[in-house]
Image (tube, rainbow, N blue to C red):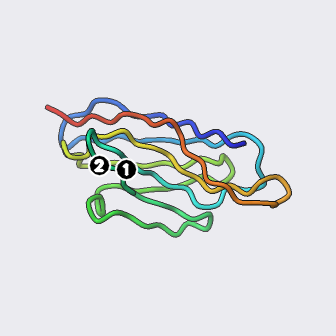
Amino acid sequence: QVQLVESGGGLVQPGGSLRLSCAASGRFSKINAMGWYRQAPGEQRELVATITSSGFTHYADSVKGRFTISRDNAKNTVYLQMNSLKPEDTAVYYCNADAASVGYASINNYWGKGTLVTVTV
């Protein structure tokens, strides 16, 4: 099993910045792709950004140029630096990861419990 624990959410004014972190722990051989998703009230969960174990990144059009995803493979941690935040960025942000099981027998997908980001004046 893999546990993903997010941190760094909070309340920020429009134009401000926040940095989210997500640390993976538990029993696994390797963390492959990691990513961030978000879900606003009354909306479906949507992709924000992903990053492969070798560092290739992908962003939703709505956050390109404002958000940066990065990771520290030694710490099994993924980050999301969010700049120029807008009220429409308000959502619960969820960490996601693909992890290879012990012995590489399988690859499973895991979710964190989420961290709330609120952008308001």
Residue situated in front as seen by the camera: 19 or 93: 93
User: In the drawing, does residue 16 fall left or right of residue 1?
Assistant: left
**Other residues around mark 2 within 10 Å, as few (<14) / some (14–19) / many (≥20):** some
The residue type indicated by label 2 comes to Asn
Q: What element carries label 2?
A: loop
Which comes before the other along the chain, label 1 or label 2?
1
**Other residues around mark 1 within 10 Å, as few (<14) / some (14–19) / many (≥20):** some
Across and down, in percent, residue 79 comes to 49, 48
Across and down, in percent, residue 111 comes to 55, 45
Question: Contact (CB < 8 A) between labels 1 and 2?
Answer: no
User: In the drawing, does residue 89 fall left or right of residue 23?
Assistant: left
In percent of the image, x 24 and y 40: which residue is there? 16
Across and down, in percent, residue 104 comes to 81, 61
Q: Residue furthest right?
A: 103
Residue situated in front as seen by the camera: 67 or 104: 104
The residue type indicated by label 1 comes to Arg
In percent of the image, x 29 and y 58: which residue is there? 63
Residue at image mark 1: 45
Residue situated in front as seen by the camera: 72 or 57: 57
Q: Quadrant of residue 118?
A: top left
Which is more foreground, mark 1 or mark 2? 1
Q: In the image, which disc is placed on residue 83?
A: 2
Q: In the image, which disc is placed on residue 94?
A: none
User: In the drawing, does residue 46 fall left or right of residue 25?
Assistant: left
In percent of the image, x 62 and y 63: which residue is there? 53
Q: Is mark 1 on a helix, strand or loop?
A: loop
Q: Quadrant of the N terminus?
A: top right
Q: In which quarter of the image is residue 40?
A: top left
